[in-house]
Each structure stands twice: as structure tokens, then as C-alpha cells.
Amino acid sequence: MSDTKVKHGSPSEILVEAEAFEDYGSWILDSQFEEQMGSPYLLAHGLGRPVEDARTTITIQEAGEYKIWVRAKDWVPSHHPGRFTLSINGKTLDIEFGANGRDWMWQFAEVVELPRGNATLELHDLTGFDGRCDAIFLSRGDTIPPEKTDEAAHAWRKALLGLPDEPGDAGDFDLVVVGGGVAGCAATLSAARLGCRVALIHDRPYLGGNASKEVGLGPRGEKGPFVAELTGRTTDGDLHALKILEAEPNVSLFLEQRVCKAIWNGAKIVSVDARHARNGRESRFHAPVFIDCTGMAILGLLAGAETRFGREPRSEFNESLAPEDPDGMHHGNTVFFRTRMADEPVIFPDVPWALDVAKDYADLGGQLGKPGKENKPGPFAGSPRAPLVMTADGAFFENPMDFPASHFWEYGQWLDPYAEGERIRDHLFCAIYGTFANVKRLEPEKYAKLALDWVGHVPAQGEYRRFVGDYILTENDIRAHKVFSDAVVLNSEAFCLHYPGHEKYDFRLKDWKWIARDGRPYSIPFRCLYSVNIPNLMMAGKHISVTHIAGSSTKMMGNGGQHGIAVGAAAFLCKKYDTTPRGIYEAHLQELQHIIKGITG
């Protein structure tokens, strides 16, 4: 599975990164929390059935006794659901990893006598419930692997793996786009078709972000033919964006690479470094202009861009939907799932650790039917749902909170989404596994054949930090259809506001407001699409310069695609006139608007 061989700093010390295993078996690579816990890892995501072993071969240059360390995590410390063992040359070590009640840590296993030559390592999953292994360290000395996830620990790993101290040169481009969601794909394609040489750096193996086949949301908002072209789906659910961008000669795609550093001269970004998830190699990308389409403002935060987080007070912008006082609440993350009826009865293990979260909840509504088709009903047990009633908009539930909406499975609204993303995802795992167990337990005959068909290990990302641009769009601007001289694209859709705090089930929303306004699209000014303090940084997607309330509408992925078109066109003009985005606003706005109109029709 990896193009990297295991390396070591000396014959007596060997570091084996789990992502470098030659054969993952049925374990999967999970790199989305690298910034939090220090490294990509292998995840045994078997939905209650143990996955096939992961295997690799290493070379022992110096025979002797080796101390074996394994970095693992007990993700539910009270019950240890994610347990696995390690075998070396066919001998299984006595210890079960993921069972020590600790978060990510290096755990000493035992001392093993190893002969010179090849040695085989195998990870054996015991449960099917998301055991996770980061790395294995073999040492003939007294070295204790570093527990921290700081620069020193990263340097230790690089040295043992034989990775260079400095990043390799990835080349010079007219534009670097960071983040390959719908917004990033649109920005890349619009700039490339105008003649820019574009590097698109994306940290996942699939394009599309929340619309990708890994997550599966259908883009909402203002799409148009350009975004529709990118977001059409193949038979397996992948977006057409990959083939479209691969066929574009001005585009260079860099998948499974996470931007980890920004280098600047004065206030301007001059280059970014990205680290490959599978082999750990770092590359440096140079460009005069950068666009952050991460949805999390990752590049902006690395570069010191001014941002906002949480909800503004009502008094700041006189927004009717804003709270009286400011706070750090945000839209949380969601894990999507799907069930099916099998041909034979399906046994599901007892999951008391999941019931601690799910409690007695027994409604599996809000499933992802297939990529692009969410909000599907599902099996439920116990009390019947509220009835459907006919409204002016068609059939709906009497109580909107009984509607089987996929995003009602949401958590993390009061947590730090940057530092606690894995915790948020794992809490939702428990909610889904526990609810599934409740449905089968409460109506065993009816649901004897009920099976979990799929549970995404990549959550749909909610709200993170938002950039501050030269203008901050507000609720009132949207409601009034404010006329902007620098309007570049249209956005549409309702204000979609999520409110946590369910009195019993913390993974469910307490309330949801879908405020359709007048149904008419509204304008996005160009000043919302570039940073107020980083002169050559633009942004597209849900983290543009808006308030929390305005962002509940502009966040729609179709809308983000429109932002992408605009900043891609602006990047072309930055190249043409050797200027900054603000320079385009001040001197070339009409040309920008003309180009965008030609793209969007």
C-alpha cells in the first residue's frame, strides 16, 4: 500500500510507521487527525467484525534482543473496544493494545529475540471496533520514544525514517490552491482554463470535501453549469472533478498531502510546505498567489491571517438571528451511515461503551442512501415517529426535529474542532453503534437481519474559523439583497442554523432553523474573498469573510463553488497585472466581473 520502505537511523533502532505497511489488509489509512495526534495511523473500521490483518516486512541488520514499543490509543478507556495484537515472525506478543485506558501513547510490549534478515509484522484486529495503530518502534538500546507531538518528536521520526531535513522542491506555479473541496476544485479549474499553472494540494485521496465519496453530501446552493460539471458523479459515487482536473494541462494535483507550513516575506506568503500522508515526505510549493479552500482556514492560520470564530453578538451587526451575547458555539461535525437488510440474521456484539452515549435512542433515520442522497429514513424501534402532514412545500413532519435529516446527528458544537476532531468523530461512532444496537435489541425479530452497511470514518466537517476580509457579509446584507459595486457572484439558499443541547441525547440537535427568506439569490462582494492582512491570500468556501449567521447560508457547497470561480479568475488577473487581490479590487474590478460573467453565464 505504500511507496516507502521502512528505514532506521542505526541498525539497532527501527521505526515502522503503520502507514508504510506493505499490505493494509482491511485496515484503512486515517490521516485526518495528523495535526492533533502527530501522524497518520491505521484504523480497524470493521463495524463490529474484525478486519483482515495488516502486514509488512522489515530488515533486521543486527541480530539480538529488541524492545518492542507500539503507539496506540484506547479510544473508549472505560471499555477498550478497539483492541488488537502485534505478531512478529508469526509469534503474537502477549499484550493487547488499545486496552490500557490511555489516549495516544507509546506502550512498551516486551523484549523479542530477532535474527538477522527479514522479519514479518502483522496487526491483528480483535473487535472490528476501530482499533488504531500509529507506529511500531524496535530498539536494542534504552531509547524511549517521545510522547509529545511537537517538532522535536517529528524530527525524531524523520531521522529514523531517513527523510531529508528540508522539503523537496515541488516547483513554481502561478497559483497554489489548498483544499480540494467543491470550492477548491472550482478555483483550480477556473484559473487553469484562463491560463494559470495551478497546484491543487488536498489532504484526502478523493476530491470534493463534504461532497466527496468519503462523506457524500449533495452540494446545495447556487451551482450553475460550471459547478454542476465538477460535481456530477461516477457510478461509484466519486465526483467528475478528478477526471476533469487530471485532463487539464495547467493543473498539477497533489492528493493526500497536508499543508503544514507557510513561509512568508513581510506579510506575503511566498511558499507552502506539504507533507505526504503515506510516506511522510515534504514538498515546497512556490507561487505569487494562494487560495485557502480548506473550509478550516488552515493556510490562513499558518500564515497569521485575521480570523473570527463562533457567534457574534446581536449588537455588533444588528442581526436578528444572532444571540444576545457572543460565544464559541459553532456547527458541529456529522458522521454519515447506512443500514441494509441482509439475507441472513446478523449478530451485532454487545456495545455497552456505545450505549453510554446513545442511551436508549433507537431511531436510525437520517441515513446517507448513497453519495449525494442524504436525509433518508431508517429503521426505528419503540415509539412511532410523528406523522407526516401536508404543507405548502409538500409532505413534512409535524415536528421538524422528527424529520430524518442526516445532519441532526451532530456533535462538537462547544468543543475546539481543531484540537478535538478525533474525539468528536469517535463520540458520533458511539452514537451510531449504540443506536443500531438498541434498534436490534428492542425489536429482535423484526430487525434480526438488519446490518450496518457503511459508517463513514471521515466526518462531514461543520464550522471552523472564518477569515476577515475587507468586508464582512451579514444577515442584513443577505435579507436586503444589498447592492455591492464589487459583487462578483450570486449565492442562494436559506439560513441553516443548528442548535445543540438536546436534553437527553447530546449527539442530536436541540433545534434546527431553516429560514428560506424570499428564495432569491444574493450577491457576494469580492472584498469578502481576500484576506484583510495577508496581501496575496484569497479564500473560497464556508470560511469566507462573513458572520456566523450569514455563513449559515454562504456555507453551502454550491455557493462555495461560486466563490471558487471568482477567486480563480482573480488569480488570473493577479498574474496578468502583477498585483494583489486588493489591487484587482482597486484597479481591475470591471474586468474581473466581466471574466466571471463569461464563466458563470
Image (cartoon, grey):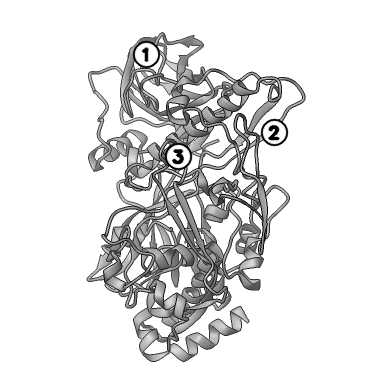
| Mark with earlier residue (3, 1) | 1
Label 3 or label 1, whichever lies nearer to me, is 3
Q: Residue at x 38, y 37 (%)?
A: 423
Residue 491 vs residue 443, the one in the foreground: 443
Give the x, y percent position of residue 432: 53, 33
- Crowding near the residue tagged with mark 1, few <14, some 14–19, many ≥20 C-alpha atoms within 10 Å: some
> Residue at label 2?
340
- Which kind of residue does numbered mark 1 sit on? Ala
Give the x, y percent position of residue 228: 65, 66
- Which kind of residue does numbered mark 2 sit on? Arg
- Which kind of residue does numbered mark 3 sit on? Phe
Residue 16 vs residue 510, the one in the foreground: 510
Find the distance from the CA under tag 2 to the CA under tag 1.
52 Å
SS under mark 2:
strand
Q: Please, is residue 174 above or below residue 485 in the view? A: above
From the image, which quarter does the N terminus lie in?
top right
> Residue at label 3?
507
Specify whether 14 is left or right of 480: left
